[in-house]
Image (tube, rainbow, N blue to C red):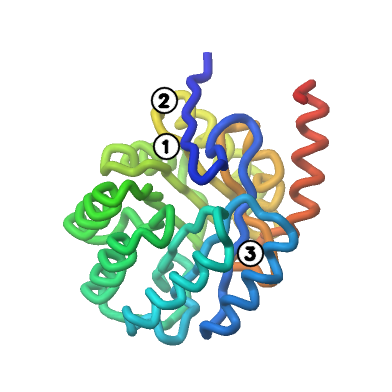
Amino acid sequence: MKREKVIRVRGRQFGGDTPVICTPLVGPTRDVVLGEAASVLAKVPDVIEWRVDFFERIGDTAAVLEVAGSLRAAVGDTPIIFTRRSAKEGGTRIAPSEADVLRLYDAVGASGLVDFLDFEMGNDPEHVRSVVETAHAQQMRVILSYHNFGYTPGVEFLVGRFQEAERLGADVAKVAAMPRDRSDVLTLLAATASADSKSGIPLISMSMGPLGSVTRMIGGVFGSTLSFAVGESSSAPGQMPIADLRTVYEVIRRARGEA
């Protein structure tokens, strides 16, 4: 029997058969970020992700904290994921040093302004440990993530990434990979289902690009608890509009006989 692995944040439930819908904010300036937030809130996403690697002043911790505070005030009780994606895992080329990134995460984690910190598990192990400890000290959750924009590794490797995230102290494990053919999409789904049967934390997974877009629609059937959707701009290839994704989820719920 599938174990229930649920996280409840600000009235939203992460876990269960229907993924929550998260939309990214990718503006380069404070005004654009807050403008994006106002626009996408009208579409009622379950979660907001601030992709700070798009922010031009990422190297200015005070500026980042000011925007985080303004964003919290703007979105109210909508949970916020704070993410700096490195260039090697699909992020922008704005490149503070890894030591600066760690200091930024420590400051944002200590601020209590966001609900999740997304940190790449491929970072220095001591940096991963520091981010997890800082976040948990503030009752904040950590998403440890792995992205492969080149290809889709095998099932065993992908399951290992999910398990490694849990071993490192993640509250949520995320794995994303780029498919080269249809079998790669099936590999990602099979790995998610296998990891879900073994893990004690919620999982997020996706096969990226147009070929993998189907996983954003049916991932919940295989154990993925969150899907990213376009509010104003996408942060990764294959994302679809919020309204379309919500419609798909409703169809799936009805087909499964769920209320």
Give how far across and how far down residue 160 sits, in percent. Answer: 36, 38
Give how far across and how far down residue 213 sits, in percent. Answer: 69, 52
Residue furthest top as drawn: 1
Q: Earlier in the sequence, mark 1 or mark 3?
A: 1
Query: The residue under label 1 is which amino acid type?
Result: Val
Residue at the image position 24 percent from the left and 71 percent from the top: 103
Residue 144 numbered tag: none
Q: Is residue 123 left or right of residue 204?
A: left
Give how far across and how far down residue 239 sits, in percent. Answer: 67, 59
Give the Cα distance between marks 1 and 3: 23 Å
Residue furthest left as drawn: 126
Residue 198 numbered tag: 2
Please tell me whether mark 3 sits on a helix, a strand or a loop: loop
257 in relation to 159, above or below: above
242 or 235: which is nearer to us? 242
Please tell me whether mark 2 sits on a helix, a strand or a loop: helix
Residue at the image position 43 percent from the left and 67 percent from the top: 85
Q: Are marks 2 and 3 in contact (CB under 8 Å)?
A: no
Total tally of numbered discs in the picture: 3
112 or 88: which is nearer to us? 112
- Density class for disc 1 (Cα within 10 Å; few <14, some 14-19, many ≥20) is many
Query: The residue under label 3 is which amino acid type?
Result: Pro
The residue wearing badge 3 is: 237
Check the picture and name the quadrant holding the C terminus: top right
Query: The residue under label 2 is which amino acid type?
Result: Lys
Q: Are marks 2 and 1 in contact (CB under 8 Å)?
A: yes
Which of the two marks, 2 or 1, is nearer to us in this view? 2
Q: Earlier in the sequence, mark 2 or mark 3?
A: 2
- Density class for disc 3 (Cα within 10 Å; few <14, some 14-19, many ≥20) is some
173 in relation to 50, above or below: above
37 in relation to 209, above or below: below
The residue wearing badge 1 is: 159
